[in-house]
Image (cartoon, rainbow, N blue to C red):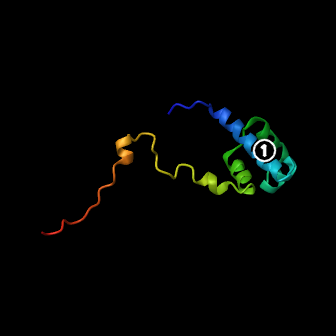
Amino acid sequence: MLSIKSPLEIASDLAGRLRERRLQRAWTQDEIARRAGLKTATYVLFERTGRISLIRLLKVLEVLDLLEEFDRIGRGQDLAGMSLEQLTKPERQRGRRKQP
């Protein structure tokens, strides 16, 4: 699949969005790091570069009440490879034909 953004760009954008969530709650970097059980330097580096381990990211998402949203990734039906006909065609029902 071709993406317009690179993984590093997406990581950086995510860090920026989580920074905004942190600021909406009026939390310092030290406070969110403490709540997530991280070293402050680890969290500061994440906001600056977007780099963080998955487990640490999940801890940050948890304290920002976003963990459930993250957990939904990949659970929906993948529509990317389907044709318009497949998307609009009703699913066939199995059953017995009625006797005339």
Q: Residue furthest front?
A: 100
Category of crowding for the residue at label 1, using alpha-carbon neighbours closer than 10 angstroms: few (below 14), some (14–19), many (at least 20): some
Quarter location, residue 79: top left
Q: Residue at x 87, y 49 (%)?
A: 28
Q: Percent position (x, y) of residue 6? A: 62, 31
Q: Residue at x 63, y 54 (%)?
A: 69
Q: Percent position (x, y) of residue 84? A: 38, 41
Q: Dot 1: what SS?
A: helix
Q: Nearer the viewer, residue 61 or 13?
A: 13
Q: Percent position (x, y) of residue 81? A: 42, 39
In the displayed structure image, the side of residue 43 where residue 67 appears, left or right: left
In the displayed structure image, the side of residue 90 where residue 17 appears, left or right: right
Circle 1 residue: 19
Q: Residue at x 72, y 38 (%)?
A: 51
Q: Is residue 23 above or below residue 9?
A: below
In the displayed structure image, the side of residue 41 where residue 65 appears, left or right: left
Inspect the image, locate mark 1, and give the three-letter code of the amino acid beneath it. Arg
Q: Quadrant of the C terminus?
A: bottom left
Q: Percent position (x, y) of residue 71? A: 60, 54
